[in-house]
């Protein structure tokens, strides 16, 4: 029974992530079109129905599945094939520790809406995110192309630079909540300050939120941090990729966008928490309350997590179509001389405040 429940949770998370990836490929076109006063994708149809261009991602998938798989002469066939699989696998496996709900009791049985409930979930996420870079580096090297290699070097240097800042920004949260478990962090954010303000990370670590969100966007390799891909250039780690292999790299970018939004939601915006909502219903100030069944509580909390996740996916798309790409030296300067010192200052200030409060 336990294995079946674990499989159902993993299946649910996988479908939610892939569903978000599917929608983001459509939003990539429609949101940019609205911002640029265009119509956007609206041609692909089924029996005359276009559904605002929602069939375009399906048409893209069919096109990628039917295109020729090209491996350049002199390239390493095995590593060329493994690279997109490695990149996509580590992006997906990171969701195993993301709590999309709490722990709910149905009679004598309790269900935790987290695929892998470990007490070092934060370390797990950073470890898997760090392993993903091997897919991008191998893609550039195995293609036997100098432009591809240059793109993979860009990717590795950018991800190393911003992962340090990302790791430093969450130390303040670890000091405040005293845990590396993502589920326990979300539970701690459900507590109230002065009886009415939730202890969300955004309120306790505002600078940490700004730094973490910026570094997380850099990890997704999307505009304005898309130098490794160079969409308007001929430099990029997937220059020599076609067909579904290219599609996997393309999908990985959107999956990493969903992962970044999920981490921001979990660490800084209460995750699945809804203010004043507890396991038995709402408890409002003034001794007011509304009783709810466990199923309704679970639905509200899972829904809250998905709404927050959708908002931050939308926000990152908004930034993606608003800002231009950073120049390479500006990108490195931002990471090493501005964001990293600020993250260290944030740690020191957090420690002093904790000592002062006692």
Image (spheres, rainbow, N blue to C red):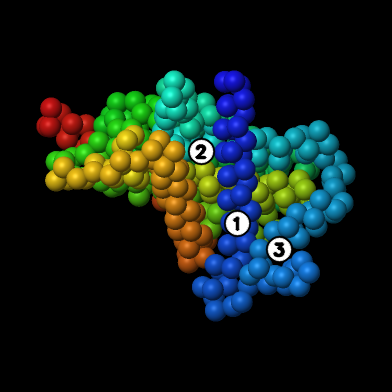
Q: Looking at the image, is mark 2 or mark 1 earlier in the sequence? A: 1
Report whether 267 appears left or right of 275: right
Label 2 element class: helix
Q: Can residue 244 be spotted in the picture?
A: yes
Q: Looking at the image, is mark 3 or mark 1 earlier in the sequence? A: 1
Q: Are marks 3 and 1 in contact (CB under 8 Å)?
A: no
In depth, the one of 353 and 240 nearer the eye is 353
Specify the quadrant of the image occupied by residue 184: top left
Q: Can residue 332 be spotted in the picture?
A: no
Nearest to the eye among marks 2 and 3: give it. 3
Query: Residue 59's spot in the image, x, y percent?
Result: 76, 60
At horizontal 59% and vertical 68% (from top left) the residue drawn is 30
Query: Residue 231's spot in the image, x, y percent?
Result: 64, 60
* Label 1 crowd bin: few (<14), some (14–19), many (20+), radius 10 Å: some
Q: Looking at the image, is mark 2 or mark 3 earlier in the sequence? A: 3
Which residue is tagged 2?
160
Label 3 element class: helix
Query: If the image is split into quadrants, where does the C terminus sit?
Result: top left
Report whether 312 appears left or right of 288: right
Which residue is tagged 1?
23
In the displayed structure, 137 sits above or below 246; it is above
Mark number, residue 56: 3
Q: CA distance from mark 2 to mark 1?
A: 29 Å
In the displayed structure, 3 sits above or below 253; it is above
Q: Are marks 2 and 3 in contact (CB under 8 Å)?
A: no
Q: CA distance from mark 2 to mark 3?
A: 35 Å
In depth, the one of 113 and 188 nearer the eye is 113
Q: Are marks 2 and 1 in contact (CB under 8 Å)?
A: no
Specify the quadrant of the image occupied by residue 10: top right
Query: If the image is split into quadrants, where does the N terminus sit?
Result: top right
At horizontal 72% and vertical 50% (from top left) the residue drawn is 247
């Amino acid at each position: 029974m336990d294995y079946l429940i674990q499989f159902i949770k993993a299946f649910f998370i996988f479908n939610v992530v892939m569903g978000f990836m599917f929608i983001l490929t459509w939003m990539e076109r429609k949101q940019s079109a609205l911002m640029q006063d265009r119509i956007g994708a609206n041609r692909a149809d089924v029996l005359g129905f276009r559904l605002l261009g929602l069939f375009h991602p399906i048409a893209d998938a069919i096109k990628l599945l039917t295109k020729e798989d090209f491996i350049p002469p002199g390239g390493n066939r095995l590593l060329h094939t493994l690279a997109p699989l490695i990149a996509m696998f580590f992006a997906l496996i990171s969701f195993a520790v993301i709590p999309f709900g709490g722990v709910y009791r149905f009679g004598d049985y309790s269900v935790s809406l987290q695929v892998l409930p470990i007490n070092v979930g934060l370390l797990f996420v950073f470890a898997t995110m760090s392993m993903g870079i091997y897919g991008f580096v191998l893609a550039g090297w195995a293609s036997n192309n100098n432009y591809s290699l240059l793109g993979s070097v860009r990717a590795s240097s950018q991800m190393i630079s911003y992962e340090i800042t990302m790791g430093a920004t969450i130390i303040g949260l670890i000091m405040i909540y005293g845990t590396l478990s993502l589920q326990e962090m979300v539970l701690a954010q459900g507590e109230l300050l002065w009886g009415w303000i939730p202890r969300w990370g955004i309120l306790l670590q505002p600078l940490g939120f700004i730094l973490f969100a910026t570094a997380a966007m850099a990890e997704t390799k999307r505009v304005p941090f898309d130098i490794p891909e160079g969409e308007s250039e001929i430099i990029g780690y997937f220059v020599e990729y076609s067909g579904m292999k290219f599609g996997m790299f393309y999908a990985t970018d959107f999956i990493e966008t969903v992962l970044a939004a999920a981490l921001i939601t979990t660490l800084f915006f209460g995750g699945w928490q809804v203010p004043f909502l507890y396991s038995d219903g709402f408890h409002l100030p003034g001794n007011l309350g509304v009783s709810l069944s466990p199923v309704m509580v679970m639905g509200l909390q899972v829904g809250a997590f998905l709404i927050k996740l959708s908002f931050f996916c939308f926000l990152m798309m908004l930034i993606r179509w608003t800002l231009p790409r950073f120049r390479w030296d500006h990108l490195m300067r931002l990471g090493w001389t501005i964001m990293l010192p600020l993250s260290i200052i944030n740690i020191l200030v957090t420690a002093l405040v904790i000592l002062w409060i006692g």
